[in-house]
Amino acid sequence: MKKTLSLALALTLALSLTACGGGESSSAPAGGSSQPDASASTPADASASSAGNEAEAVDDVAAVTEKGTLVVGITNFEPMDYQDADGTWIGFDADMAKLFAEYLGVTAEFVEINWDYKVMELEAGNIDAVWNGMTLNDEVRAAMATSVPYCLNAQVLVVPADKAADFEGLTSLEGLNVAVESGSVGEDAAIALGGSTVPVPKQADTLLEVSAGTSDAAVIDLLMAGAMIGEGTSYENLTYVLNLNELQGQDSEEYGVGFRPDSNLVDEFNAFWAEKVADGTVLEVATTYGLQESVILE
């Protein structure tokens, strides 16, 4: 079901390898789950690393350790988070989340959330982290404490392969019914380019829309497109024709992990990530899912 993204990413992400994200225009992509409230946690002395406000860190590390689980909010998003034949969550993000939980001395628990409500899920204490190919933008950074960026991405337009020629040279999406994940960066991009959006709960659902002919096109993450459409996938009849970041003159997007504001899990994650980059684990896991060209190793 997966195929290597090396060529696609080399061509489409070459526009920018700089460290400044720019994609997900909604501060809320998908959300929904359960776990203890962070109000029971104890403030620590360290300050949060991302929200921009000087404040005492929330000791989520202690809370996670006490309950023995790291609850991770996700959506079904191949190749980042998806289920194998046995129903086990796998993917680049899922595998790395399991390793991070192990680093903390706990186990990972995955909860499918509605992307629109991810911030509320964090604030309610239902999840400890949003880890699902989340684009870092100003809104996300204002609502959460965010990790170092770990992966590059772009938004692409998916269309029926036999109609791809009809979309060549497009400079806008006016006149098109475009399936998008509700609350996603792809939805924002489609609206900005004049498309009539058809919001659906998950990115994967947008492909069903196009394949069934109920939408003209879909906007999804490039990394998902590389894994889920084209030869060797369940959607061999679909292809992507436009990089919407390039069309809008934007840099590539960057993925990051989100935690509660002022959570000390951010510093723990950043230390964990640096360690796993240094020992080659990140590249090894990325290669498993064909993401070796997009993962950030600096």
Image: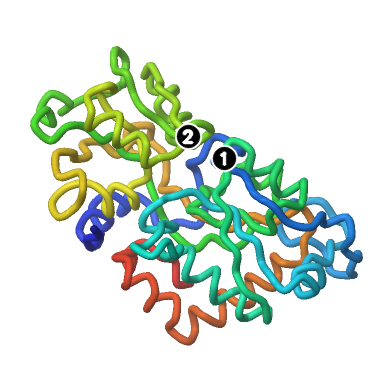
Q: Nearer the viewer, residue 125 or 223?
A: 125
Q: Residue at point 91% right, 64% down? A: 43
Q: Is residue 186 above or below residue 251?
A: above
Q: Which residue is mark 2?
A: 201
Name the element at disc 2: loop
Q: Is residue 276 above or below residue 221?
A: below
State the colouring used for the structure image: rainbow
Name the element at disc 1: strand
Q: Nearer the viewer, residue 64 or 239?
A: 64
**Which amino acid type is marked by label 2?**
Pro
Q: Residue at point 75% right, 69% down? A: 64
Q: Residues within 10 Å of mark 1 (few under 14, many from 20)?
A: many
The answer to which image quadrant residue 131 occupies is bottom right
Q: Nearer the viewer, residue 172 or 127?
A: 127
Find the residue positioned furthest to the bottom. Answer: 279
**Residue 227, disc:** none
In the image, taking residue 254 as reference, residue 102 lies left or right, namely right
Q: Where is residue 244? Give x, y as percent.
A: 34, 35
Q: Which callout, 2 or 1, points at the residue further toward the start of the chain? A: 1
Q: Where is residue 110? Give x, y as percent.
A: 57, 60
Indicate the quadrant containing the N terminus: top left, top right, bottom left or bottom right.
Answer: bottom left
In the image, taking residue 283 as reference, residue 112 lies left or right, namely right
**Which amino acid type is marked by label 1?**
Asn
Q: Where is residue 79? Give x, y as percent.
A: 36, 58
Q: Where is residue 105? Give x, y as percent.
A: 68, 81
**Residue 114, disc:** 1
In this rendering, the count of numbered labels is 2
Q: Are marks 2 and 1 in contact (CB under 8 Å)?
A: yes
Q: Between marks 2 and 1, how big is the CA–CA gap?
A: 7 Å
Q: Residue at point 82% right, 51% down? A: 53
Q: Residues within 10 Å of mark 2 (few under 14, many from 20)?
A: some
